[in-house]
Amino acid sequence: MVKIKMISRSLDDHLPSSASAPHPLQRNLAPHLHPFAKPREYQRAITAAKMDRMFAKPFVASLGGHQDGAYCLGKDPRRVSVVAAGGGDGEVIVHSLSQRRSLLKIDAHKGMVGGVCWTSEARDGKRGIVTCGKLDGTIKIWRSSAFAPGLKVDDDEGGDEVLDSAGAVGEDDDDDDLAMDEDKRNTFGLNLEPSMIYTSKNGFNGIDHHRSDAMFATASSTVQVWDENRSSPLSTLQFGSSVETVTSVRFNQSETSVLASVGTDRTMCLYDIRTGKAERRIMMNMRSNALSWCPTLPTVMLLASEDHNLYTFDIRNLESPTQIYKGHVGGVMGCDWSPTGEEFVSGSWDRTVRLWKRDTGKSRDVYHTKRMQRVFDVTYTPTADFVLSASDDGNVRIWKTNASQKLGPISTKERTAMEYRQKLVEQWSSEKHVRQIAERRHLPASVHNTQKLKREMLEARKVKEDRRRKHTRAGKEKPKAERKKAIIKEQK
């Protein structure tokens, strides 16, 4: 019996999906039929790298309102469009990122604000801000309906005032949100009273709130753990008889009983709040100004050092850092991980903001403006789309994490083309010309000249060490690895 094979073709492969869609094209992908595919793709990769640099406009907006410099930032992990910034004059301003204006201005402290963080309540209407002062030695918790979008506050003249979508006090339902009375909002903030005040003999340099419990930790001459409902600290954590001044403290977001701090005597210390003891401490060559825990890897910690570098450590092995990140030409003042844990951002005394990949020791991008001064704090938004920086020129700046990213709605065809160009650049990133175009950055003259001077100094130091090793007994010893040089000793 003879079997007859029928040739069948699907009309979906040959007809357009709609009247406006293009006809599908059939292509034979056999390599011998496309001898010039690689040269064509290489040229497209160069064009894609050039387009990426042409459309690179990372700066989004600048949020003002501070009479003095902005020195600390506090992001709300549950809301994308709200951030609090503490200034050198004691004011704390709650900013709206979506509307690019201030929502509430609070006269919080006398002197510089040491730190700002948000409480951990699950409901927006109950969330508050915790602030601490560097000079007046007070901690204050501020609670207001203005922090929560969609709620209402009582008006003295009668009736309720509606809050706009970003959480600011509105005059009328029909009025434009952007045209609200700024003086009325400022008066509302200045008359706001703290719901709780804690006092101490020493000023506070930093503060961080527990992820889920009603407790927070402060950094002063010691590390203190506080309960929101008690006026005195629950515990005071200190390593031995150390007399250091703690500059920053952070809770681990996964292992919430683990606490880390950095101090002025060049140390980084780990604590366990369950035992109330300091567990381990390392001493580095130069002091660290800030630290941040990786949100996806609980054992990975990032340190921002005064020696212009950043270091990542695995707390299971503190003998040497797992990676050293070089690029800044000034002390690194602030750092923060992306919510994905794959990247982080740093701000430096050299007036630049740099973005880094976790596995690469060189920054992938550098942000700067002509008016931006020394950067003291940086943070990611909870969606990882934007980066915020606070500098001593009194502004909080918003940057895109991807400099060439388009803001606003994007069509499917446009998104496909952008993803294709990005994949081309990644695929050909090892090629010389594509890499040069993709990594090319224009830096301020001061940073460029300082980089050149620093490179000459490091090369001269290396030549001196090589000659000493060659002509003295030191040459018999094995040269010390650079990661080993960062740590002086570890104490347990």
Image (cartoon, rainbow, N blue to C red):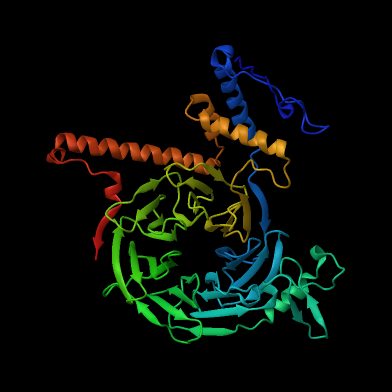
Image quadrant where residue 37 sits: top right
- Report the side of 223 relative to 158 (left or right): left
> For the N terminus, which image quadrant?
top right
The percent coordinates of residue 45 (x first, y second) are 58, 26
Q: Total marks drawn?
A: 0
Image quadrant where residue 491 sits: bottom left
The percent coordinates of residue 333 (x first, y second) are 47, 57
Which residue is at 67% across, 81% downward? 192
- Report the side of 440 relative to 268 (left or right): right
Q: Residue placed farthest to the front in the image?
A: 1
Image quadrant where residue 327 sits: top left
The percent coordinates of residue 269 (x first, y second) are 33, 66
Q: Residue placed farthest to the right in the image?
A: 174
Which residue is at 29% across, 65% downward? 280
Q: Is residue 229 above or below residue 203?
A: below
The percent coordinates of residue 228 (x first, y second) are 51, 82
Which residue is at 80% across, 70% downward? 181
Which residue is at 57% across, 30% downward? 424
> For the C terminus, which image quadrant?
bottom left
Q: Is residue 104 above or below residue 331?
A: below
Q: Is residue 396 above or below residue 225?
A: above
